[in-house]
Image: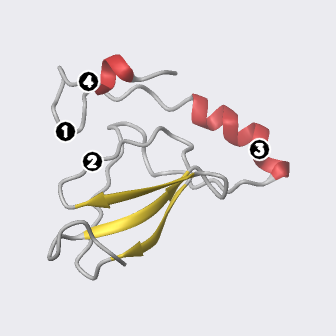
Amino acid sequence: MSVPFPGVAAARLKLGEESGQEVAVQAGDVLVLPAGTGHRRLEASGDFLVVGGYPAGTGDYDMQRPEKATHDASVQRIAQVPLPGADPVTGKQGALRSAWKP
C-alpha cells in the first residue's frame, strides 16, 4: 500500500458496500458513519488502528448484512437509531448535530 506520508498509519477503505466509494485515511482522520453504512478495510499499514464508538443508549451494535429477505426489517431498525447527543470529536456544539440528516 502506498501511504501519503512515510511512517504515518494509513488505510484504504470501502464505504457503502460493494458499490460504495473507496477512501484513503491516515492517522488523525475521523469518519462518522450513519447507522446502516456498510464499510470495510481494503488494505492498511501494520500500525493502522481503528477506534469506534456508538451513541449512549443504543446498546450493543446490531450488525446487518445486505440480504433481500431482511432488507425491510433492517431499514426499520436503522431508522430507530437516535441522533447522537454530541459530535464525538468536538462535543455538544460540534458540526455533527447540525449536519445529521435523518
What's under tag 4, amino acid-wise? Ala
Look at mark 2 in the image and give the residue it sits on.
30
Say if mark 1 contacts mark 2, CB within 8 Å: yes
What's under tag 3, amino acid-wise? His
Packing grade of label 4 (10 A; few <14, some 14-19, many >=20) is some
Say if mark 3 contacts mark 4, CB within 8 Å: no
C-alpha separation, residue under disc 1 versus residue under disc 3: 31 Å
What's under tag 1, amino acid-wise? Val
C-alpha separation, residue under disc 3 versus residue under disc 2: 28 Å
Look at mark 1 in the image and give the residue it sits on.
89
Packing grade of label 1 (10 A; few <14, some 14-19, many >=20) is few
The single residue placed furthest to the right in the displayed view is 69
Identify the secondary structure beneath mark 3.
helix
Residue 36 image-quadrant placement? top right
The x and y percentages for residue 89 are 19, 39
Q: Which of pointers 3 and 2 indicates the residue nearer the eye? A: 2
> Nearest the camera: 77 or 65?
65
Which of marks 2 and 4 precedes in the sequence?
2
Residue 71's label in the rendered image is 3
The structure residue drawn at horizontal position 59% and vertical position 29%, both measured from the top left corner, is 79
Which of marks 2 and 1 precedes in the sequence?
2
> Nearest the camera: 3 or 76?
3
> Nearest the camera: 11 or 67?
11
Residue 95's label in the rendered image is 4
C-alpha separation, residue under disc 1 versus residue under disc 2: 8 Å
Which of marks 3 and 1 precedes in the sequence?
3
In the picture, measured across the screen, residue 21 lies left or right of residue 70, that is left
What's under tag 2, amino acid-wise? Val
C-alpha separation, residue under disc 4 versus residue under disc 2: 13 Å
The structure residue drawn at horizontal position 26% and vertical position 24%, both measured from the top left corner, is 95
Question: How was this image coloured?
Answer: secondary structure
